[in-house]
Amino acid sequence: MSVFLPDESATEALATRLAAALPPRTAGLTLLLRGDLGAGKSTFARALIRSLGHSGAVPSPTYTLVEPYDLPGGMVYHVDLYRVSSEDELRYLGWTELDEGFRIVEWPDRAPGIAARADISVEFEYEEPGRRASIVGLSPDGKRIVARLDTATATEPVN
C-alpha cells in the first residue's frame, strides 16, 4: 500500500494506525524503515513507539545503535544501522538477543540479511509537498498486518 503524507502529523498518524494493526504481542516481528536522510523514518519510529505505550522521550539510536523500550505488549527495540558498515557488526550489537522483542530498524540496507527475515517494510520517499510511504508485508504475519492497516486506511484516510 502507498500513502501520501503531506506533513509530520500525517506521518505520526500513519504510525499510530500501524500500531493499532499490530497483534497484541509483537515479539519476534521486524519492521524495516527505509528512505533518505530526513524522509521521516525517525518521526515514524517515535510515533510508533509512543503509540505502543511509551510516554517518555524517544531518543534517536544513531549513536547508541539500539534503544530498548519495555512496553505493555513486550520489548521494543529501535535500531539504527546507519553507522554499521557490515552485517558482521550485528553480532557485536547482540542482534540475536533482540529476538524476544519487536525490532524497528532504520537503515536496514546496511545489513542486507535482515530484510530476508523481516516482516514489514516501510519506505519513505520525498514527494512534494510532503512524503510518500510505501508499506509492504514481507512475511505471512507482515502481510496480515498490512492488510489490516490497508483496510483501516481505506475507511479512515490519512490526512
Image: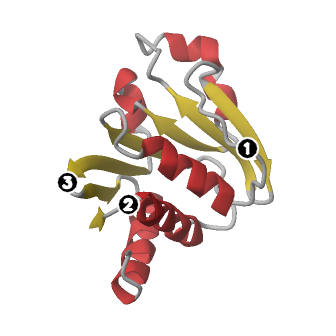
Secondary structure state at the residue bearing disc 3: strand
Query: Which residue is disc 3 drawn over?
Result: 127
Contact check, label 1 and label 3, Cβ < 8 Å: no
Q: Is residue 27 above or below residue 91?
A: below
Earlier in the chain: of badge 1 and badge 3, it is 1
| Identity of the residue drawn at 34% across and 28% down | 109
Query: Which residue is disc 2 drawn over?
Result: 7
Cα gap from disc 3 to disc 2, whole angstroms: 11 Å
Query: Please, what is the three-letter code of the amino acid marked with disc 3?
Result: Glu
- In the rendered image, the residue lying farthest to the front is 129
Q: Quadrant of the C terminus?
A: bottom left
In this view, the residue in front, 128 or 137, is: 128
Cα gap from disc 1 to disc 2, whole angstroms: 21 Å
In this view, the residue in front, 88 or 70, is: 70
Number of residue marks: 3
Q: Position of residue 94 (x, y in %)?
A: 66, 20
Q: Is residue 1 visible?
A: no
Q: Which mark is residue 57?
A: 1
